[in-house]
Image: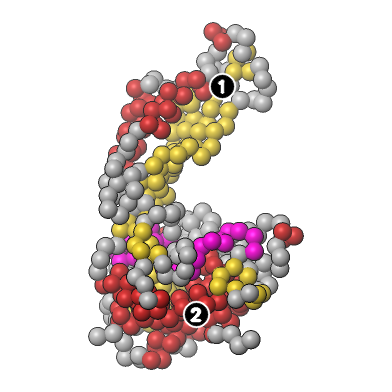
Amino acid sequence: MQISPTIELTQQLISRESVTPEDAGCQQLMASRLEKLGFNIESMFYVDTLNMWARKGTEAPVFCFAGHTDVVPTGDVKNWSTPPFEPVIKDGHIFGRGAADMKGSLAAMVVATENFVKAHPDHKGSIAFLITSDEEGPFINGTMKVIETLEARNEKIDMCIVGEPSSTNYCGDIVKNGRRGSLTGDLTVKGVQGHVAYPHLAENPIHKVSQSIFQLTQTQWDLGNDFFPPTSFQISNINSGTGAGNVIPGDVEIMFNFRYSTEVTAEQLVHQVETLFNDNELNYELKWTYNGLPFLTDEGTLVDAVNIAVEEVTGKKPQLLTTGGTSDGRFIAPTGAQVVELGPCNATIHKVDESVAIADLDQLTEMYFKVLENALLP
Protein backbone atom coordinates (compact mmCIF):
# COMPACT_ATOMS: atom_id res chain seq x y z
CA MET A 1 0.00 0.00 0.00
CA GLN A 2 1.41 3.38 -1.04
CA ILE A 3 1.00 5.97 1.68
CA SER A 4 1.09 9.75 1.38
CA PRO A 5 3.80 11.99 2.88
CA THR A 6 1.30 13.05 5.56
CA ILE A 7 0.65 9.47 6.68
CA GLU A 8 4.36 8.66 6.60
CA LEU A 9 5.15 11.63 8.86
CA THR A 10 2.22 10.74 11.14
CA GLN A 11 3.71 7.28 11.60
CA GLN A 12 7.10 8.74 12.46
CA LEU A 13 5.55 11.06 15.05
CA ILE A 14 3.40 8.35 16.65
CA SER A 15 6.44 6.12 17.05
CA ARG A 16 7.99 8.68 19.40
CA GLU A 17 6.75 8.02 22.95
CA SER A 18 5.97 11.61 23.87
CA VAL A 19 3.79 11.22 26.96
CA THR A 20 3.29 14.67 28.44
CA PRO A 21 5.47 16.65 29.03
CA GLU A 22 7.97 14.66 26.95
CA ASP A 23 8.56 15.61 23.32
CA ALA A 24 10.72 12.56 22.49
CA GLY A 25 12.20 14.12 19.37
CA CYS A 26 8.96 15.07 17.64
CA GLN A 27 9.80 18.75 17.38
CA GLN A 28 13.25 18.03 16.01
CA LEU A 29 11.69 15.83 13.35
CA MET A 30 9.38 18.68 12.34
CA ALA A 31 12.16 21.28 12.58
CA SER A 32 14.46 19.32 10.26
CA ARG A 33 11.83 19.52 7.52
CA LEU A 34 10.92 23.16 8.15
CA GLU A 35 14.57 24.24 8.12
CA LYS A 36 14.83 22.99 4.52
CA LEU A 37 12.06 25.46 3.63
CA GLY A 38 13.94 28.40 5.12
CA PHE A 39 12.32 28.48 8.55
CA ASN A 40 14.26 29.95 11.47
CA ILE A 41 13.92 27.52 14.38
CA GLU A 42 13.89 28.59 18.03
CA SER A 43 13.76 25.97 20.79
CA MET A 44 12.30 27.37 24.00
CA PHE A 45 12.70 25.15 27.06
CA TYR A 46 10.92 26.10 30.27
CA VAL A 47 11.37 23.93 33.39
CA ASP A 48 10.18 20.58 31.98
CA THR A 49 8.69 21.54 28.65
CA LEU A 50 10.21 21.81 25.18
CA ASN A 51 8.59 24.29 22.82
CA MET A 52 9.35 25.29 19.25
CA TRP A 53 8.80 28.62 17.54
CA ALA A 54 9.57 28.35 13.84
CA ARG A 55 9.09 31.21 11.42
CA LYS A 56 9.66 31.79 7.71
CA GLY A 57 9.55 35.42 6.66
CA THR A 58 9.71 38.73 8.49
CA GLU A 59 6.65 40.56 7.19
CA ALA A 60 3.02 40.65 8.29
CA PRO A 61 0.61 39.02 8.24
CA VAL A 62 1.94 36.15 10.34
CA PHE A 63 0.02 32.93 9.74
CA CYS A 64 0.70 30.40 12.50
CA PHE A 65 0.04 26.68 12.86
CA ALA A 66 -0.20 25.77 16.55
CA GLY A 67 -0.25 22.36 18.17
CA HIS A 68 1.27 19.93 20.65
CA THR A 69 3.52 16.91 20.42
CA ASP A 70 2.67 15.51 23.86
CA VAL A 71 0.04 12.82 24.32
CA VAL A 72 -1.92 11.46 27.25
CA PRO A 73 -0.77 8.22 28.93
CA THR A 74 -1.86 5.00 27.27
CA GLY A 75 -3.22 3.24 30.33
CA ASP A 76 -2.70 -0.51 30.47
CA VAL A 77 -1.17 -1.42 27.09
CA LYS A 78 -2.73 -4.89 27.42
CA ASN A 79 -6.05 -3.24 26.56
CA TRP A 80 -4.73 -2.03 23.20
CA SER A 81 -5.19 -4.14 20.08
CA THR A 82 -1.74 -3.05 18.88
CA PRO A 83 1.17 -1.40 20.73
CA PRO A 84 0.19 2.28 21.17
CA PHE A 85 3.53 3.67 19.96
CA GLU A 86 3.89 1.32 17.01
CA PRO A 87 1.65 2.87 14.34
CA VAL A 88 -0.47 0.36 12.47
CA ILE A 89 -2.55 0.92 9.33
CA LYS A 90 -5.71 -1.15 9.27
CA ASP A 91 -9.14 -0.77 7.67
CA GLY A 92 -8.31 2.64 6.25
CA HIS A 93 -7.20 4.04 9.62
CA ILE A 94 -3.88 4.64 11.31
CA PHE A 95 -3.82 3.48 14.94
CA GLY A 96 -1.61 4.73 17.76
CA ARG A 97 -1.56 7.13 20.68
CA GLY A 98 -1.74 10.65 19.32
CA ALA A 99 -3.03 9.66 15.89
CA ALA A 100 -6.02 12.00 16.23
CA ASP A 101 -4.82 14.19 19.10
CA MET A 102 -2.83 15.56 17.45
CA LYS A 103 0.13 14.09 15.59
CA GLY A 104 -1.93 13.60 12.46
CA SER A 105 -2.68 17.32 12.40
CA LEU A 106 1.00 18.17 12.93
CA ALA A 107 1.97 16.02 9.96
CA ALA A 108 -0.74 17.63 7.82
CA MET A 109 0.52 21.10 8.80
CA VAL A 110 4.12 20.33 7.84
CA VAL A 111 3.27 18.67 4.52
CA ALA A 112 0.76 21.39 3.60
CA THR A 113 3.42 24.01 4.29
CA GLU A 114 5.98 22.13 2.20
CA ASN A 115 3.54 21.96 -0.69
CA PHE A 116 2.55 25.62 -0.34
CA VAL A 117 6.10 26.99 -0.20
CA LYS A 118 7.05 24.88 -3.22
CA ALA A 119 4.04 26.10 -5.18
CA HIS A 120 4.17 29.72 -4.01
CA PRO A 121 7.73 30.67 -3.00
CA ASP A 122 6.93 34.39 -3.26
CA HIS A 123 3.88 34.39 -1.00
CA LYS A 124 3.19 37.44 1.12
CA GLY A 125 3.62 37.59 4.89
CA SER A 126 5.14 34.93 7.14
CA ILE A 127 4.37 31.36 8.14
CA ALA A 128 5.05 30.19 11.69
CA PHE A 129 4.74 27.08 13.86
CA LEU A 130 4.12 27.27 17.62
CA ILE A 131 4.53 23.73 18.97
CA THR A 132 4.58 22.64 22.61
CA SER A 133 4.89 19.43 24.64
CA ASP A 134 2.74 20.77 27.50
CA GLU A 135 -0.85 20.87 26.23
CA GLU A 136 -2.05 17.62 27.79
CA GLY A 137 -0.37 18.45 31.11
CA PRO A 138 -0.60 21.47 33.40
CA PHE A 139 -0.20 23.88 30.42
CA ILE A 140 2.09 26.16 32.46
CA ASN A 141 5.39 25.97 30.60
CA GLY A 142 4.09 25.55 27.08
CA THR A 143 2.19 27.83 24.73
CA MET A 144 1.51 30.36 27.47
CA LYS A 145 5.25 30.86 28.03
CA VAL A 146 6.00 31.09 24.32
CA ILE A 147 3.31 33.74 23.88
CA GLU A 148 4.77 35.70 26.81
CA THR A 149 8.16 35.60 25.07
CA LEU A 150 6.73 36.71 21.73
CA GLU A 151 4.71 39.49 23.34
CA ALA A 152 7.78 40.76 25.20
CA ARG A 153 9.54 41.32 21.88
CA ASN A 154 6.35 42.55 20.16
CA GLU A 155 6.23 39.65 17.72
CA LYS A 156 2.57 39.26 16.80
CA ILE A 157 0.56 36.39 15.34
CA ASP A 158 -2.20 37.63 13.02
CA MET A 159 -3.93 34.35 12.15
CA CYS A 160 -3.65 30.96 13.81
CA ILE A 161 -5.01 27.49 13.14
CA VAL A 162 -4.85 25.16 16.14
CA GLY A 163 -4.86 21.55 14.95
CA GLU A 164 -7.05 20.13 17.69
CA PRO A 165 -9.46 17.39 16.53
CA SER A 166 -12.50 19.61 16.01
CA SER A 167 -14.53 17.40 13.66
CA THR A 168 -17.38 15.09 14.61
CA ASN A 169 -18.78 13.08 11.69
CA TYR A 170 -16.31 13.88 8.92
CA CYS A 171 -13.17 15.96 8.62
CA GLY A 172 -14.04 19.62 8.41
CA ASP A 173 -17.70 19.40 9.42
CA ILE A 174 -17.02 21.57 12.48
CA VAL A 175 -14.61 24.45 12.95
CA LYS A 176 -14.14 25.89 16.42
CA ASN A 177 -14.03 29.67 16.11
CA GLY A 178 -13.97 30.27 19.84
CA ARG A 179 -14.03 28.63 23.24
CA ARG A 180 -15.74 29.25 26.54
CA GLY A 181 -13.76 30.52 29.48
CA SER A 182 -12.87 28.13 32.28
CA LEU A 183 -12.75 29.06 35.96
CA THR A 184 -12.16 26.53 38.75
CA GLY A 185 -12.85 26.98 42.45
CA ASP A 186 -11.26 24.89 45.23
CA LEU A 187 -13.49 25.40 48.26
CA THR A 188 -12.90 24.28 51.83
CA VAL A 189 -15.76 24.78 54.29
CA LYS A 190 -14.77 24.39 57.94
CA GLY A 191 -16.90 22.93 60.71
CA VAL A 192 -16.32 21.22 64.03
CA GLN A 193 -15.65 17.47 64.12
CA GLY A 194 -17.64 15.43 66.60
CA HIS A 195 -19.69 12.33 67.34
CA VAL A 196 -22.83 11.84 65.27
CA ALA A 197 -24.75 11.06 68.48
CA TYR A 198 -23.88 14.50 69.88
CA PRO A 199 -24.51 16.91 66.99
CA HIS A 200 -24.99 19.84 69.40
CA LEU A 201 -21.27 19.56 70.22
CA ALA A 202 -20.20 19.66 66.57
CA GLU A 203 -20.88 21.59 63.39
CA ASN A 204 -21.35 19.66 60.17
CA PRO A 205 -19.77 21.59 57.26
CA ILE A 206 -21.65 19.48 54.71
CA HIS A 207 -24.94 20.61 56.16
CA LYS A 208 -23.71 24.21 56.30
CA VAL A 209 -22.68 24.36 52.64
CA SER A 210 -25.62 22.42 51.20
CA GLN A 211 -27.89 25.44 50.83
CA SER A 212 -25.16 27.40 49.06
CA ILE A 213 -24.48 24.57 46.65
CA PHE A 214 -28.16 24.27 45.84
CA GLN A 215 -28.37 27.99 45.18
CA LEU A 216 -25.36 27.86 42.88
CA THR A 217 -26.86 25.00 40.86
CA GLN A 218 -30.09 26.97 40.42
CA THR A 219 -28.49 30.27 39.41
CA GLN A 220 -28.84 31.51 35.84
CA TRP A 221 -25.52 33.22 35.23
CA ASP A 222 -26.36 34.55 31.77
CA LEU A 223 -28.38 33.67 28.68
CA GLY A 224 -25.44 33.07 26.35
CA ASN A 225 -25.47 34.58 22.86
CA ASP A 226 -25.42 33.63 19.19
CA PHE A 227 -22.07 31.86 19.56
CA PHE A 228 -22.00 30.69 23.20
CA PRO A 229 -24.43 28.65 25.30
CA PRO A 230 -25.31 29.98 28.76
CA THR A 231 -22.60 29.76 31.41
CA SER A 232 -22.62 26.45 33.29
CA PHE A 233 -21.69 25.57 36.89
CA GLN A 234 -20.64 22.02 37.73
CA ILE A 235 -19.27 20.34 40.86
CA SER A 236 -16.48 17.93 39.95
CA ASN A 237 -15.21 16.66 43.35
CA ILE A 238 -16.43 16.43 46.96
CA ASN A 239 -14.26 15.04 49.76
CA SER A 240 -15.11 14.88 53.45
CA GLY A 241 -15.18 12.66 56.50
CA THR A 242 -12.83 10.23 58.20
CA GLY A 243 -14.30 7.12 56.66
CA ALA A 244 -16.04 6.20 59.89
CA GLY A 245 -19.85 6.18 60.05
CA ASN A 246 -20.11 7.78 63.47
CA VAL A 247 -17.97 10.91 62.99
CA ILE A 248 -19.22 14.33 61.91
CA PRO A 249 -16.52 15.69 59.58
CA GLY A 250 -14.48 18.73 60.49
CA ASP A 251 -14.38 20.11 56.95
CA VAL A 252 -15.52 19.45 53.40
CA GLU A 253 -13.54 20.10 50.23
CA ILE A 254 -15.45 20.88 47.05
CA MET A 255 -14.07 21.54 43.59
CA PHE A 256 -16.30 23.22 41.04
CA ASN A 257 -15.93 24.70 37.58
CA PHE A 258 -17.53 27.38 35.46
CA ARG A 259 -17.52 27.21 31.66
CA TYR A 260 -18.54 30.74 30.86
CA SER A 261 -19.55 32.78 27.85
CA THR A 262 -18.51 36.25 26.77
CA GLU A 263 -21.66 37.58 28.46
CA VAL A 264 -19.99 37.44 31.89
CA THR A 265 -16.48 37.93 33.24
CA ALA A 266 -14.51 35.74 35.61
CA GLU A 267 -14.42 38.63 38.08
CA GLN A 268 -18.21 38.83 38.07
CA LEU A 269 -18.50 35.10 38.75
CA VAL A 270 -15.99 35.29 41.61
CA HIS A 271 -17.83 38.20 43.18
CA GLN A 272 -21.23 36.51 42.88
CA VAL A 273 -20.02 33.24 44.44
CA GLU A 274 -18.13 34.86 47.31
CA THR A 275 -21.07 37.18 48.07
CA LEU A 276 -23.34 34.14 48.33
CA PHE A 277 -20.96 32.33 50.69
CA ASN A 278 -20.59 35.41 52.85
CA ASP A 279 -24.34 36.00 52.99
CA ASN A 280 -24.80 32.39 54.11
CA GLU A 281 -22.14 32.93 56.82
CA LEU A 282 -19.89 30.08 55.77
CA ASN A 283 -16.48 29.63 57.40
CA TYR A 284 -14.55 28.93 54.21
CA GLU A 285 -11.35 29.19 52.22
CA LEU A 286 -11.57 29.49 48.44
CA LYS A 287 -8.80 29.29 45.83
CA TRP A 288 -9.56 30.32 42.27
CA THR A 289 -7.76 29.03 39.17
CA TYR A 290 -8.21 31.02 35.98
CA ASN A 291 -7.83 28.35 33.29
CA GLY A 292 -8.55 30.54 30.30
CA LEU A 293 -10.57 33.47 29.01
CA PRO A 294 -13.37 32.99 26.49
CA PHE A 295 -12.53 34.03 22.96
CA LEU A 296 -14.36 34.39 19.68
CA THR A 297 -13.06 34.85 16.15
CA ASP A 298 -15.93 36.28 14.14
CA GLU A 299 -16.14 36.50 10.37
CA GLY A 300 -12.98 37.89 8.83
CA THR A 301 -9.86 36.91 6.92
CA LEU A 302 -9.14 33.64 8.74
CA VAL A 303 -12.71 32.38 9.12
CA ASP A 304 -13.39 33.19 5.47
CA ALA A 305 -10.18 31.43 4.39
CA VAL A 306 -11.08 28.31 6.38
CA ASN A 307 -14.72 28.23 5.26
CA ILE A 308 -13.72 28.43 1.60
CA ALA A 309 -10.98 25.81 1.98
CA VAL A 310 -13.21 23.29 3.74
CA GLU A 311 -16.00 23.73 1.22
CA GLU A 312 -13.57 23.33 -1.69
CA VAL A 313 -12.33 20.02 -0.27
CA THR A 314 -15.55 18.52 1.14
CA GLY A 315 -18.22 20.24 -0.91
CA LYS A 316 -19.90 21.43 2.30
CA LYS A 317 -19.58 24.51 4.46
CA PRO A 318 -18.34 23.82 8.02
CA GLN A 319 -20.37 24.66 11.09
CA LEU A 320 -18.81 27.25 13.39
CA LEU A 321 -19.06 26.22 17.05
CA THR A 322 -17.54 27.17 20.41
CA THR A 323 -18.56 24.03 22.32
CA GLY A 324 -16.26 21.57 24.04
CA GLY A 325 -13.32 22.05 26.34
CA THR A 326 -10.38 24.41 26.15
CA SER A 327 -7.34 24.51 23.90
CA ASP A 328 -4.11 26.46 23.68
CA GLY A 329 -5.98 28.90 21.49
CA ARG A 330 -7.00 30.58 24.75
CA PHE A 331 -3.42 31.80 25.18
CA ILE A 332 -3.06 33.03 21.60
CA ALA A 333 -6.38 34.83 21.05
CA PRO A 334 -5.90 37.48 23.80
CA THR A 335 -2.92 38.88 21.85
CA GLY A 336 -5.33 40.01 19.14
CA ALA A 337 -4.83 37.04 16.82
CA GLN A 338 -7.64 35.48 14.82
CA VAL A 339 -7.80 31.87 16.05
CA VAL A 340 -9.73 28.82 14.86
CA GLU A 341 -9.41 25.10 15.48
CA LEU A 342 -9.53 22.72 12.54
CA GLY A 343 -8.56 19.09 12.79
CA PRO A 344 -9.74 15.49 12.27
CA CYS A 345 -12.57 13.64 13.99
CA ASN A 346 -12.39 13.37 17.76
CA ALA A 347 -14.30 10.12 18.36
CA THR A 348 -11.27 8.16 19.66
CA ILE A 349 -9.12 10.83 21.32
CA HIS A 350 -7.66 9.79 24.71
CA LYS A 351 -9.17 6.34 24.24
CA VAL A 352 -7.67 2.88 23.89
CA ASP A 353 -6.97 2.12 20.22
CA GLU A 354 -6.94 5.80 19.25
CA SER A 355 -7.11 6.13 15.46
CA VAL A 356 -7.75 8.51 12.60
CA ALA A 357 -8.92 7.86 9.05
CA ILE A 358 -6.13 8.06 6.50
CA ALA A 359 -8.44 9.83 4.05
CA ASP A 360 -9.21 12.47 6.70
CA LEU A 361 -5.54 13.34 7.20
CA ASP A 362 -4.97 13.62 3.46
CA GLN A 363 -8.03 15.86 3.19
CA LEU A 364 -6.84 17.91 6.16
CA THR A 365 -3.51 18.46 4.41
CA GLU A 366 -5.38 19.79 1.39
CA MET A 367 -7.51 22.05 3.61
CA TYR A 368 -4.46 23.52 5.32
CA PHE A 369 -2.84 24.09 1.91
CA LYS A 370 -5.89 25.94 0.62
CA VAL A 371 -6.17 28.02 3.81
CA LEU A 372 -2.59 29.16 3.27
CA GLU A 373 -3.44 30.09 -0.31
CA ASN A 374 -6.56 31.98 0.75
CA ALA A 375 -4.74 33.85 3.53
CA LEU A 376 -1.31 34.55 2.05
CA LEU A 377 -1.71 34.98 -1.69
CA PRO A 378 -2.41 38.44 -3.15
**Kind of residue sitting beneath label 2:** Asp
Which residue sits at x=47%, y=65%? 169
* Residue assigned mark 2: 362
- The x, y position of residue 321, in whole percent, is 36, 59
**Kind of residue sitting beneath label 1:** Gly
- The x, y position of residue 118, in whole percent, is 41, 91
- Rendered-image quadrant of the N terminus: bottom right
- The x, y position of residue 94, in whole percent, is 61, 73
Decide whether residue 351 is among the magenta residues: yes
Determine the CA span between mark 2 and mark 1.
58 Å
Q: For residue 299, what is the image quadrant? A: bottom left
Which residue sits at x=30%, y=54%? 227
Q: Secondary structure at mark 2?
A: helix
Give above or below for 54 relative to 250: below
Give above or below for 221 relative to 48: above
**How many numbered circles does the render carry?**
2
Residue 165 seen: no
- The x, y position of residue 310, in whole percent, is 37, 74
Check whether the beta carbons of the residues at disc 2 and disc 1 lie within 8 A of each other: no
Mark 2 vs mark 1, foreground winner is: 2
Q: Secondary structure at mark 1?
A: loop
Magenta stretch bounds? 328-353
